Amino acid sequence: MRTAVTVSALALTASVVGPAALQVSPAALASSETSRPGGMFTTSGKDDPTPTPTPKVKKSTPAPPDSPLLQSTVVDTVAYGPHIRQRMDVWHQADGLRRPGVFLVHGGWWSAGDKKYMADITKSYAEQGYTVFNLNYRLSGDAPWPAQRTDVLDAITTARRHAALWSFDPGDYAVVGFSAGGHLAAAVGTYGNGLPGLRGVVGVSPVTSPMLAYIDGVDTLDLNRRRLREAAIQLAGGCEPARCPKIWASMEVSRHASLGDVPMLAVHSQDEFVPAEHSLLLKERLRLFGVGMTVVTEPGADHSTPLYRLPEVEERVQDWIAGKLL
């Protein structure tokens, strides 16, 4: 099932477009890079692939925009899996061009958050001419790890397989994640021996080491660090490291580093509860495989999207992405 929303100068308003959806034409699916018969989406080689039906398309009429490019922007909500959380908003043009893509992954302790809170950031990338995929994913209360990584992989697979529907170049995209979403973005960046078409990963306050979060949350007066420790335990299905070492090893991004990984950028605040040590551990591991990672530390204690919204951070991230995409 798909819904659509419109772009307006002031807000984003979700609207159900009616019970009858238009079936994607066979020609459109055939023109997609990796479409397969049967209308099922899978990601090969994953630990728990989730099949989903061929998407159906119903588009809304764009409202008056803030910029000329947004005048023709259409926003579709696409189901990439059967769970209610397996949805993504696709901001795209209907001009048939092959545009680079940006995937956005929200934060929220792995247990909360929603793509709707990423609307302004999504809009800013659409204004720059990217096809933008703003993701929801199953939370830790819905399913334990690795369901969250699997969902991001499935969303990317869906986008690449049906790239022609959204004027998207499946060989040219970046993934940007915030806080817990930064963990998922980095986990995708180190998955297997590299994803086709992925050019770079950005994490803003990324929790790339749940184990470090677990350790930092012991005997501390910092309520956020204590909460992050509990959130990491919940992500592991309620199982602590001593009892479930394989699960915790799987959650550690640095444990999956390999030659096929892509460059990364991480931004932390100097005094936030997700310290730069998370990213420095990953940077050192990636260095062993000749993969570059830039770790930036900003003054203050801003975390996740408030950190990103600092003008110097937003500009740096956007410039970095522009330099990595073709």
Image: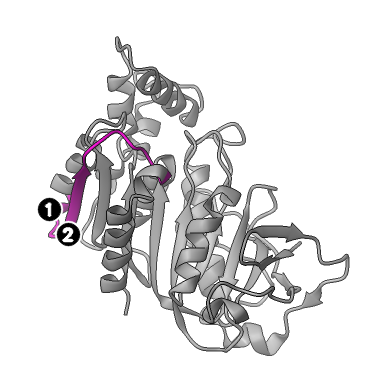
The N terminus, quarter of image: bottom right
**Closer-to-camera residue (225/22):** 225
Label 2, on which residue? 291
Find numbered disc 2 in the image and state the secondary structure of the residue it sits on. Answer: loop
Q: Give the image location of residue 126, x and y in percent.
A: 50, 71
The C terminus, quarter of image: bottom left
Residue drawn 61% across the image and 84% down it: 94
- Callout 2 touching callout 1 (CB < 8 Å): yes
Q: Amino acid at mark 2?
A: Val
Q: How is the image coloured?
A: one colour
How many residues crowd mark 1 within 10 Å: few (<14), some (14–19), many (20+)?
some
Residue 301 highlighted magenta (yes or no): yes
Q: Is residue 44 above or below residue 114?
A: below
Q: Amino acid at mark 1?
A: Arg
Q: Give the image location of residue 75, x and y in percent.
A: 64, 69
Q: Give the image location of residue 309, x and y in percent.
A: 38, 50
**Closer-to-camera residue (281/310):** 310
**Magenta-colored span:** 286-305
Find numbered disc 1 in the image and state the secondary structure of the residue it sits on. Answer: helix
Q: Is residue 143 above or below residue 52?
A: above
Residue drawn 31% across the image and 28% down it: 273
Q: Is residue 101 above or below residue 150?
A: below
Residue 99 located left or right of residue 136: left
Label 1, on which residue? 287
